[in-house]
Image (cartoon, rainbow, N blue to C red):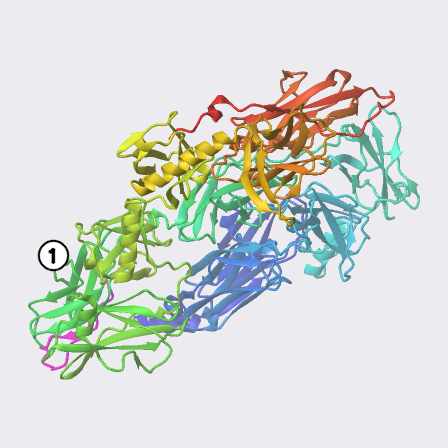
Amino acid sequence: MALERHIIEERISRAPEILVRLRSHTVWEKMSVSLCFTVQGFPTPVVQWYKNEELISPASDPTKYRIESKYGVHVTTTFLNSIKSILYQIQYKNHTKAERELLNLAHFSFLEKFGVTFATEGETLTLKCSMLITPELKRLRPRAEWYRDDVLIKDSKWTKLYFGEGQAALSFTHLNKDDEGLYTLRMVSRGGISECSAYLFVRDADALIAGAPGAPMDVKCHDANRDYVIVTWKPPNTTSESPVIGYFVDKCEVGLENWVQCNDAPIKVCKYPVTGLQEGRSYVFRVRAVNSAGISRPSRASEPVAALDPVDLERTQSSAWTEQKTFLYFYKNVQIPGPPTNVHASEISKTYVVLSWDPPVPRGREPLTYFIEKSMVGSGSWQRVNAQVAVKSPRYAVFDLAEGKPYVFRVLSANKNGISDPSEITEPIQPQDTIVLPSAPGQVVATRNTKTSVVVQWDKPKHEEDLYGYYIDYSVVGSNHWEPSNHKPIKYNRFVVHGLETGEQYVFRVKAANAVGLSENSQESQAVTVQAAAYFLVACPSYPHGITLLNCDGHSMTLGWKAPTYSGGSPILGYYMDKREANHQNWHEVNSSLITQTIYTVEDLIEDAFYEFKVAAANLVGIGQPSDPSEHFKCKAWTMPEPGPAYDLRICEIRNTSLVLLWKAPVYEGKSPITGYLVDYKEVDKEDWITANEKPTPKYVFELFFKLALPFILFKVTDLHEGHTYVFKVRAVNDAGVGKSSEISEPVLVEERPGTKEIYSGVDDEGNIYLAFECKEATDASHFAWGKSYEEIDDSHKFKIETEGNHSKLYFKNPDKSDLGTYSISVSDTDGVSSSFVMDDAELERLMALSYEIRNPTIPLKSELAYEVLDKGEVRFWIQAESLSPDSTFRFVINDKEVENGERHKINCDRPNGIIEMVMEKFTIDNEGTYTVQIQDGKAKNQSSLVLIGDAFKKVLAESELQRKEFLRKQGPHFSEFLYWEVTDECEVLLSCKSASPLKILCTEEGIRLQCFLKYYNEEMKVSWCHRESKISSGEKMKIGGGDDVAWLQITEPTEKDKGNYTFEIFGAKESYKRTLDLSGQGMFIRSDFYYRGKVIGGLPDVVTIMDGKTLNLTCTVFGNPDPEVVWFKNDKAFEIDEHYSFKLEQGKYASLTIKGVTSEDSGKYSIHVKNKHGGETVDVTVSVYRHGEKMPEIKPGQLAKPRPIPPSEEALKPEDK
C-alpha cells in the first residue's frame, strides 16, 4: 500500500506554476490594498511574501499585514500609512517526499562562536562562527543573517558578509562607534533557527588634540527637500575630558572630497537644519564635537541624501521599480501661483525656528520658489528673511531671532510670472528650547555576573522623553579614574559591563543623553567585586571523566576516575556508579551508598564478560550528569608481571615553561614491587612521545623527598615551550619491565595565566608565621585546599586555615623543624589555579627570627646612656633612640629607685629627635651607683645602664666640682691667663697675665642676646662681633647694639647653624681686647620654641594705599610647628568673616585676607596674629583708602611690616614629663 502511494505521488508531483501573477497598484494614502496571485503544484507549494526584499511576517505587525491562502489563491492585505512606492515579491517552492526526508535528517550546530569583542575606531575586524552542517546539500543550505541590535545588516561600504565552507563571517572595513552594539548571527534553516550573540565595544580613537572629546555618532538626515535637510546625531561620552560645548556640521557633495563647514559658531544641540543645498545634487554630512581643549575627530559620514522634492523623489524611485507605469499630473492653467497654506513651525529651538508649509493649490506648471517674512509681535512691520536667495523647498530655518521675543511669520509663493499674496499669518512663535537637559538617572545597582563582567541596573530619570540613551562609566575603587564602558548610548536601563579584572572592586555611574547633551552623573553604585555570580555556581557538579581499569581478578574490577572539573558550588559528597554488559541497553546500579573516593572495586562480575561503566558525582544540590560510558573492559584476571596503570593523573602549577604532574601509584604492582616511573609527553598536534626522564625515577626518591609515604607521586616537567599545548601519561616500572600506561591527560596549554600569584610567607602583627595565597578567580563556591607534600592538611593542632574572599592563609601554631617541606594550594572551581612553596631551614629560621622580633620588639638606639659635665658643674645623663612616638613612656632609675622630675633631677624628653635627658645640678658623693633608663613605645622596649662606681664615679665627681668652681670664678673679673713669665729679646724677664670679663647669655622673646659689660659704652666706640672668625654685620637676623655699660649681639630665632664661637672685640688706640663664648660647647641648649614658634615669614608691607571700589588682598606666608593659629584683627578687634571680608589659609602656610569693593570705612590698622604653644608674633598693616578722582597719596618706599613677638604658653615652658 505504501509502495503504491509512493509511486502515485512521484507520478503526480510537479513544480509550482503561477496561473495569475501580481499586478502593480496605485492607491491613496491610508487606504488598504490587497495583492493577489494564484499558484498550483504538488505537493502544495510554500509561499513567502517579501517587501523591498525583506520577508514579511504577519506576527511582527498583525495590524498592518494579513496573509491568506485558499485553494491556491494567495492574498496579502496591507494598510498604507504614508505615500510610498513599495515593491512586493513572492517566493514559492514545494518538496518531493525524498526532499522532505532529507529535511528531517538535516542537522546544524555551531562549532565555534564569536565572543565579546573590544576594538578601536579606525581598525578592521571580523566576527565569525564556524559550524557543522549535515548533509552538505545546496538546496538544504541554511541562510545566515547578521543583526546589530536586532536590525538586519546588509553588505555596505562598512560591512561585508560571507557565508561558506562551514563559516559565517561579518567583516568591518573601518570601525566607528556607530558599529558598537549587540551582534547576533541567526542561522535560518528548514529545521528552525539557531543563533549566537555577543557585544562589540568600539573605543574612541586617540584624539588629534589632547583632551579633545570623542567623535559624535549616528549622523542621519531627515526631511530632505530641494535645498534643505535636517541633520541629527548623538553626543559622545565624556569621562576625563571637559564637557562638549557645541558641534560643527560639515557637508560634502557626493563624488567630491571637499568638506565645507555649515555653521560658523558651534551649535549646542544635536540637530541642525542645513540650507543652501543645490537642487538635484546628493550630499553626505559629518559632525565634529568641540570642547575647551579642541575639536574632535569627525564622525562617520551619513548616508547620501538627494536635494529633491520628496514627491519627485518618490516618483523617480517608483518608476525604477515598476515598468509601464505612468503618473499624470493635472494642472490648472494658472499664471501667478496662489499663496502657500498650513504655514507652521515644525521645529523650535533657542537659536532658530524651522517653518513648514504646503505648496499652493493650484501651483501651476512653472517652478516655484518661496519668500519668508517675519514680524516681531507688536512691531507692526514685516521683514523679508530671504531677500537675496529664494527658497525652493517648503521648509526653511529662520536664524538670528531675539531670544525670548515672540514672532509671527508668513510665506509668499513665486514663479517667473510673479509673486503670490502672503499666506495666512502664523500664531505667535517664541524661540526657545523645547528639549531640556535630562535629569540624572536614579539609584545604580551593580551585581556580579561572570569572572570579567558585572550587571549594572539603574532607575530611569524622572523625565525620560526624547532620550537617546545612557552612558555607563566604571572606576576601580580608590583610583578616582573613570573609564567609559559603552561608547554609544544604549536605550535600556540594564547593561552588562565587560572587560573587568577578576577580583578587583569597581563602582559604577550612569548618565542620560538627549539632543541637548549629557545629564549630571548619577550617584555611584556600591562597590562590587568582580566574581562569577552565585546563581551560576550553586548547581549539581559537572561530570567525572577518565574512567580507568586498575585491576581485575576475574570476578571483580577496580576502577579509578577523575573528579569533576567543577563542584557546582558545594563540596562533592561522593559518587554513584552504573554498569552494563556490552551490547545491553539497560544500566544497573552498582552502589546504593555514596563512594567517597575516586576508586572503587565492583564485585560479582562474570568472568570473560565485557562491561562498561559510568560515574556521576553528587553534592548537596543533587546528582550531576553522568560521565561518558567507559570503554569495554573484559573481566579477565590480570597475571602480567609488569605493573598496572597509574591513575588520577593531575596537572597543577602551570607556568611558562614548566608544570607539576601528580598521580597515584598503580593498584596492581605486577610480580615485583614498583621501582620507578617514566613520564611521557607530547604536543597535541604531533605523534611522537617524549620521555621527560631518561631513566625511571626510583620510587624511593619520591619517598625520600617527602619523608613519608604519600597518596600522590609528584614530578616537575621542565623545558617545555611556552604557548604550546601538551598531553601527558605515566608508566610504572618494576623488575619485569614497563607497565601499562595511565590514561592520557587532558590537553594543557603551557602558559602562565595573567595575574598568576604564588604562595608567599610572612609574619603578622602578632608574630604569627603564615603562608598566604590570593586568587582573584576564586568564586563563592571555590575551596582553597592547602596541602603539605601535596597531601591535604587536616591537622588542626599544628595548623590553622583562614579564608576570606579570594585570600587564604595557613598559620603555623607552633612552628619547628617538623614543619619543613613543600606546601601546596589548589583552588577549586577555577581554571586549575595552584601553587607551591618550599619551607627550608633558611626560610623557617628567617620567619622565626622575625616572629621573635615582633613578639619581643626593641626600640633601636642611636646611642647608649652617656653623661657629660656642663659648664656650671651639672651632670647631664642622656640617651637617644632612633625615634619615639608621642605615646612613648620612659623612666630613670638610680640604684634600683625611680627618680621623678624635680629640682634635683630635671628630666626632659625630645620625642621628635628621640632624646631623653636628666640634668643633676648638684652632683655629690651620694650620687655614686648605677644609672638606668627604661623606654617603652607600644610593644617595643629597651633600656640602657651606666655604672658610676669607684674610680669612674670619682672622675665624674672631680670634673663636676672643677667646672663648678671655674664657672663661679668667671662670673666676675678673672684671669683668662694666669701669671706667667718669659724672657724677652732684650734679656728681660716679663711677668704677664690676662684678665677677662666674660660674655653673658640672656634669653629674650626674640631669641638669644650675648652681652659684654663695660665701664661705659657708646656707639662711637670701635667694636666688632665675629662668629666662627667671620665678622658679623648688623641686620634682621643678628642685630648689634649696646647701652651705657653693655655691648650686645641679638640673635633672632637661633637655629643649629648659629652654634659656634662668638668673639667680641673692642679696639683702643694701640691694642684691642677680646671676649669669647662658645655656643657649641657641651651642655649648650638652644630653646626649640624660638624656631618652632608661629611667625610671619614675609609678604606683608607696613602701609597699603588703594582706591575705593577695588579689591584688596593681603597675603603672607606663616610658619610654626605645630601649625599656628591665624587670626585677623581690624583696629585690634577681631571681625567676622562675611561676603565683604574673606579669609583663607591654604596648605597650612599661605594666609590671605580679601576685602571686596573697599570703601573709606575699610581704612585702618589690620593685624595678623600667628601663634602656637611656642609663641608667635603679630604683624600690623596700615590700609589707606582714597576716593576715585582724588589725588593719589604719596607712596613712600615700601618696607616690610615689623613683627611684635608673642611669648610662649606656660605649658610650653614647662619641662616635658616622661
All told, the count of numbered labels is 1
Q: Is residue 632 left or right of residue 484?
A: left
Question: Which sits in the foreground, 576 or 722?
Answer: 722
Question: Which sits in the foreground, 461 or 497?
Answer: 497
Residue 825 visible in the displayed image: no
Q: Which residue is mark 1?
A: 592
Assign a secondary structure to mark 1.
loop
Q: Is residue 686 left or right of residue 361?
A: left
Q: Is residue 637 magenta?
A: yes
Dominant SS of magenta comes to loop
Disc 1 residue type (three-letter): Ser
Q: Is residue 1212 above or below residue 639?
A: above
Question: Which sits in the foreground, 729 or 1170?
Answer: 1170
Q: Residue at x 40, y 50 (%)?
A: 503
Q: Is residue 92 left or right of residue 1167?
A: left
Q: Magenta span covers which residues? A: 627-646
Q: For label 1, count other residues whose C-alpha is less than 10 Å away and answer few (under 14), some (14-19) or many (20+).
A: few
Residue 26: x and y in percent read 68, 51
Q: Residue at x 40, y 42 (%)?
A: 881
Quarter of the image with the N terminus in it: bottom left
Residue 1031: x and y in percent read 67, 41
Tell me the quarter of the picture where residue 371 sits.
Answer: top right
Residue 38: x and y in percent read 54, 60
Q: Residue at x 83, y 41 (%)?
A: 362
Quarter of the image with the C terminus in it: top left
Question: Which sits in the foreground, 539 or 640?
Answer: 640
Q: Is residue 209 above or below residue 1190?
A: below
Q: Residue at x 27, y 79 (%)?
A: 693
